[in-house]
Image (cartoon, rainbow, N blue to C red):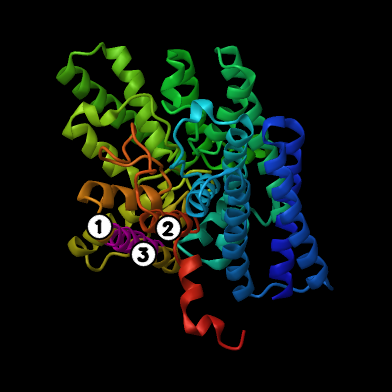
Amino acid sequence: MNVVVFVNAVLMLLLAGLMAAEALVFGESREVFLLAGVILGALGLFLAAATRGPARRLTLRHTFLLTTSVWLTAGVAGALPLFIWGMGAIDALFESVSGLTTTGATVLSGLDQTPRGILMWRALLQAVGGVGFIVTGMALLPILRTGGMQLFRTESSDKGDKELATATRYAGATLGVYSGLIVLCGLIYHIGGMNVFDAITHALTTLSTGGYSNYDASFGHFDSAFLQWVATFFMLAGAVPFAWYIRALYRRQYASEQVAALLKTLAVVILALTLWVSWQSGRDFMETLRAVSFNLVSVVTTTGYATEDFLAWGPVAITVFFFFTAMGGCTGSTAGGGKMMRWILVFRATVAALRRIRYPHRIITIRYEGRPVSEDVLSGVITFFMFYFLTVAALAVALALTGLDFDTSISGALTAVANVGPGVGTIIGPSGNFAPLDSTAKLLLTFGMFVGRLEMLTVYVLFTRRFWRDF
């Protein structure tokens, strides 16, 4: 247990250092971040000193506990500056967890007048959460063997490849690619007309597929076709497996079933929806193509930016956006949702089941990236989706019990668990936010964002009696 507490203490110290840096740069919020940094740093030092000792090997149970506790600690720590700044405790926790899980749902309004230090902190939370989840998905979830993530080992590592053999080296390579894309995105944003501060913060929240903006109008504030196309490209870049970038750089291997499926699906749906919306509304085709591309990519990649209220496009568009909220980006990316790898395997397993009915004596092997998929992986994927939709259903019922209407309850539950951000309806739709919800609903959604980011079973296993037996 000491090693789990020690790692959390080190995380506190790192976040305290980040707060200290914020205090140095942003004078208007200096007292807020200094106080938060001192409190968190003191607690981190105390826990680190109390639990420091010889390195011990982590057991599987320790790994489950470490994965969950690190994200929980980061969520609470990230809320501390927001609470000291003046937000209520529940609102601060909601905003922090939404940032770290890269959901992008917000309870803040008047963002245009919010201090820059607070805006930067929100962006940093999403950037840290984005790279944190990539590393979690690469280093920990495959070990925990939840949701079919053990298959991801074939994408993130290769026993014969010494350059990518360890999680540490892979994490370093990932951080390099991630940082490079953020810098590139920020430079192009600035060239396209954003000021330096907006370019930095929006680059952080674009590549992390988080979607926090500095303005109540979200990305629509900039009213620039060029910037919208740039954001569309980099949202997709964040939703692509970072292992794919590393394979492309190290081995010149560019093929990826996930990436191909994601791009093909988006191309077909964007074209079809653009034709429908432009025909129904009489809007210019190219303008509609840009609006549909940006907003659909934002939802599918679970970024959550918005340039306009797509709910005004009619019931067909609303249905499409609602359905694709659950899809998500690729495994090994910063995106949330069900992940393309799992959808591909579910589709192939369904086709295989139908073929077995037609040819009962034929041996049918399901393959992914040219390799046979084990029953263990398929079972993990099916279990993931069962808990995924059970969690959404249970959360929707719980939200309805707080007095929310059907649209807000079901879309709020789905957008929280899928880590998307905006939902459907007048309250939490792309033109609204989560501030009107009561404290109970906000806590429920905070839990939904948390378990959704850690892919359910990683958290739920901690609630079993057997897990804690003889711990």
- The residue to which callout 3 is attached is 387
Residue 387 lies in the magenta-colored region:
yes
Q: Are marks 3 and 2 in contact (CB under 8 Å)?
A: no
Q: Is residue 117 above or below residue 230?
A: below
- Judge from the rendering whether residue 310 lies leftward or rightward of residue 60; answer left or right: left
- Judge from the rendering whether residue 379 lies leftward or rightward of residue 53; answer left or right: left
- The residue to which callout 1 is attached is 400
Residue at the spot 69% in from the left edge and 62% down from the top edge = 8
Amino acid carrying label 1: it is Ala
Amino acid carrying label 2: it is Leu
Where does the image place residue 264, in percent across and percent down from the top left?
A: 36, 33
**Magenta stretch in the rendered image:** 381-400
Residue 55 lies in the magenta-colored region:
no
If you read the primary sequence from the N terminus, does the residue marked by circle 3 or circle 1 appear first? 3
Quadrant in which residue 172 is drawn: top right
Foreground pick, 427 / 339: 427
Where does the image place residue 155, in percent across and percent down from the top left?
A: 56, 50
Q: Give the label, 3 or 1, closer to the camera.
A: 1
Quadrant the C terminus occupies? bottom right
Amino acid carrying label 3: it is Phe
- Judge from the rendering whether residue 255 lies leftward or rightward of residue 325; answer left or right: right
- The residue to which callout 2 is attached is 443
Where does the image place residue 408, in percent across and percent down from the top left?
A: 27, 47
